[in-house]
Image (cartoon, coloured by chain):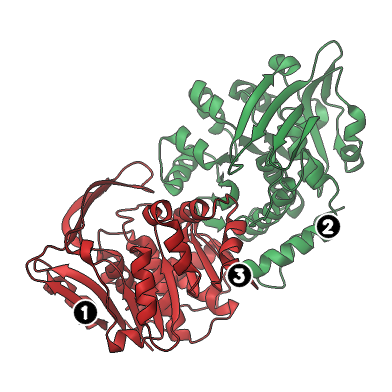
Chain colours: A red, B green
Amino acid sequence: MSITVVGSVALDSITSNEGSVERALGGSAIHFSNAASLTSDVRIVGVVGGDFPFDDVRFLKDRGVDFSSVEVVEDGKTFFWKGRYEGDMNTAITEITDLNVFENFAPKLDGKAAASEFLFLANIHPALQDHVLQEKQGNPFVMLDSMNLWIDTTPDALDKVIRQVDGVILNDQEIRSFTGINNLLMAGKEILQRGPGYVIIKKGEHGVLAMSKDWIIVLPAIPLEKIVDPTGAGDSFAGALVGYLDRAGKLDQETWKLALLYATCVASFNVRDFSVAGIAGIKGQDITECFNSFKKYFFIPGDIDVTTHVTV
Amino acid sequence: MSITVVGSVALDSITSNEGSVERALGGSAIHFSNAASLTSDVRIVGVVGGDFPFDDVRFLKDRGVDFSSVEVVEDGKTFFWKGRYEGDMNTAITEITDLNVFENFAPKLDGKAAASEFLFLANIHPALQDHVLQEKQGNPFVMLDSMNLWIDTTPDALDKVIRQVDGVILNDQEIRSFTGINNLLMAGKEILQRGPGYVIIKKGEHGVLAMSKDWIIVLPAIPLEKIVDPTGAGDSFAGALVGYLDRAGKLDQETWKLALLYATCVASFNVRDFSVAGIAGIKGQDITECFNSFKKYFFIPGDIDVTTHVTV
């Protein structure tokens, strides 16, 4: 089994109450892969400039992340984002967005990527997501993320691609904005009616609401005393979720519950440090310890283990 | 065992997307009692005008709510509130607040009320809450609610009374505002350091976060397809919670988990109809059915029953 993610590979300069980092690893495909590679082989389809520090992603390669489908534009610069968090840390304040080589990103699925069992379309222009879908082979399980920019500017293109995927993952504000429905359950049902079998609504510090035509799952997030950097938390959540599903080989409600619970634990590590550092160094034992504490916070039976598939 | 609640008894005119009601039963003490009386005997300490429709509260009296400590000012008018809900239904837009006889409310605990095992200080001026505390007898378990008005205008008086109670129940915005701390876990810990043994943070549609010095509990709310009227949801939640604790006779983490879960179910009925109607007509069987559906949404073991103490 393997996962292909199509998305941004970036360098981020981030400031929060807890400090700052300069030109650290970022982008949706990086954060997704950082989490998904805890369980699975991951192939990134993306683009970087000649300035990209490939030495910094060695830890990802060691965990089975394949960068051979990342195009390198030698005379270009890598997507750069600078932002800061204040107050409740829920919303980033963007200071600089330099798309650079990402502006002309034309994702191509080579043979291996096209044949993956799981395909994750991270947050890029919906027309590009649609293009990728035309290149896939076989019948992969396809999940899609998006953002307010595309919901506001290209809602029809986004709708077209959403109707072709198996699962949609959005945050609460995004799904409300896209559907025009305030009630999250009804907004999710609206998406289900357009075709996808699964809708995952990320609610940040408030957890997650997931649904299919047959079931609903709600989980709180893990309360943390300190948030260092929430950048990439949603992508890490998605990566852990898809990674778990990829290894479990099943899509029944019980498997989704465990996958969402596992993703909740992994995403909680993302926010504990800047950039990829929160998840980069963790082992299965760390996730187990986090999960065992979380078990006591609500009603998870003591014998459940969500780290079965973790390979680090 | 019995519960005394000190708070407002009001008439509410409410408009939402689902319709409207005129001069319907409302106020914190009414909503609290509506839920608490599903399990327990409740005594209300409050004040109404000569216009109060005592016929309308017969169903509460039938469930063991004692109105004999509700002062009737014959030539006065009952506290009246008019408001409406729009959009995400999370925030009420106030159109009219006529305090009427509530403006000069001077709560007095008569013998029975003063000797209750549970005392709930609903949202009234903290100086009045403090005054009530001086009148209590014995060693009741005291919980306190408040609101932004008192947090903004009389923070010192609120702090003084918070330091004397056993439990504090606030919503997420209120506790952030009162403590000046954005992180809910840290805000709750700050309250614990001031004396109370338990802090309950209501997060509306996102559930509840509760904590003591020894444990943390997080629960999601029940996702609902339709919210008719959220007025009193927080007071119903508190009433169900205190009602459960009153009957359970224990305060360990497992009891709090079940009490919070039970309160989550009961509060979900509050928002399904206007005023008190959502909870007024329910039976234990309705709560059981709601709970059994909710069990499937996350990880509640099948053999748990939270309706043990329900007497309707």
Amino acid on which the number 2 mark rests in the picture: Gly
Question: Residue tagged by mark 3?
Answer: B299
Q: Is residue B72 above or below residue B31?
A: above
Q: Chain of mark 1?
A: A
**Looking at the image, residue A231 lies above or below residue A35:** above
Separation (CA) of disc 1 from disc 2: 58 Å
Q: Is residue B127 above or below residue A266?
A: above
Chain of the residue under label 3:
B
Position in image of residue A31 (x %, y %) = 30, 67
Q: Is residue B58 left or right of residue A65?
A: right
**Residue type, mark 3 in image:** Phe
Direction from residue B241 to residue A61 in the image, left or right: left
> Tag 2, which secondary structure?
helix
Per the image, the residue denoted by label 2 is: B284
Q: Earlier in the sequence, mark 2 or mark 3?
A: 2
Drawn side of residue B128 relative to residue A210, left or right? right
Picture coordinates of residue B74, whole percent (x, y):
87, 13
Residue marked by disc 1: A67
